[in-house]
Image (cartoon, helix red, strand yellow):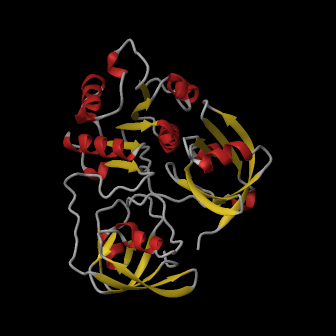
Amino acid sequence: MMRFYSLYVQKVIRLTSGSVRFDLLIPEHLKSIFHWKPGQFIRFQFEINGEIVERDYSICTAPYEGYLSFVIKRTKNARVSKFVQEHIKEGFYVLVSAPIGTFGIPSRPDEKRTLAAFASGSGISPILSIIKDTLYHESGVRFYLFYGNTNEKEVIFKNELTKLREKNPNNFFPYFLYSQQKMQDKLFEGKLDAHKIKLIINQIMNWDELDEALICGPKEMIVTLANAIYEHGIPKKNIHYELYEPVEKVFHDDKIKRSTVKEVKVTFTFQQSTKTMNWINNGSSLLTALLDSGVDAPYSCKGGVCGACICSKKEGEVYVDENLILTENDLKNGKILTCMSHPKTETLIINLDDV
């Protein structure tokens, strides 16, 4: 069961017309718990009109900065972002989980390497954390950022990114693209898509230089760019992405295994209580079956990226789709991701508490 901690909101800063940054103070006795890796996120728990809701937000500060920040971008019909922006003020306390997630890259301070990040809208949050931490620790890095927005006024962290460029002129190269603003250089006019990426890379840097790529934004953008980058010779293991929405698979050539099992009797332990349910094989994942049965099972991305839905398989078998979390050793030891699991046997026993 996920544990939540009460953190103090020490600062609230409006960044754009629809985006607000919240800075949280980490007390001394919780610093060991809130020692995050660049690219991770935290889960928030809010009470809205008597209903408990949870949302995940990426951390945008780097660990060396000593405080934890996140950004909430208000969108249409998004009642949680609306509630937080209107009701959470400086001096308030919020309920927050320990940092979770695997998006990011290991630091390599002794190497010279070229990195490229592709972000859209609020997808800049985890990317910014990674950029700042990498520039702080790696003097030999060349870090390119391609950041898409509707127009210049909607660019989150524009001033901070500009200052990072000024401070690291030989290491950091940010480029801004606008889908609804005329640009003198047409190269930076339009959305980040496969064609645009090909033009940009060919003119600004060489594909052969690129060691690793990071992508964060809408799922359509992630799928498009990940495949475009892969098709230009970058291995899948060097293409990192953070999904905020579920997607069946990212890379077009990934194979999805399915079985002929029609129904599975699932025995699951959750919050120290053991129950059973029937899982109908209609193509949906184990996570979807749990949620449809009214189980408040843990999850975040639904795309095999964050690791929030990892659990232990005690008996039975499932097909686990390709993902960025589980190693072969994890699978041998019975670890599965409910969001990527599909039926293989007619009975299954899992423990959602055992992560």
- Observer able to see residue 171: no
- Observer able to see residue 308: yes
Of residues 301 and 205, which is closer to you in this image?
A: 301
The residue depicted at 74 percent of the width and 48 percent of the height is 9
The residue depicted at 80 percent of the width and 47 percent of the height is 91
Of residues 149 and 117, which is closer to you in this image?
A: 149
Place of residue 46 in the rendered image (x, y in percent of width and height, measured from the top left) = 67, 58
- Toward the top, the furthest residue is 184
Residue 224: name its quadrant. Answer: top left
Place of residue 309 in the rendered image (x, y in percent of width and height, measured from the top left) = 46, 68
Place of residue 45 in the rendered image (x, y in percent of width and height, measured from the top left) = 65, 60
Place of residue 319 in the rendered image (x, y in percent of width and height, measured from the top left) = 28, 73
| Image vertical order of residue 258 relative to residue 170, above or below | below
Number of marks drawn:
0
Of residues 272 and 213, which is closer to you in this image?
A: 272
The residue depicted at 24 percent of the width and 81 percent of the height is 261
Of residues 46 and 322, which is closer to you in this image?
A: 46
| Image vertical order of residue 272 relative to residue 56, above or below | below
The residue depicted at 55 percent of the width and 41 percent of the height is 75
Quadrant for the N terminus in the image:
bottom right
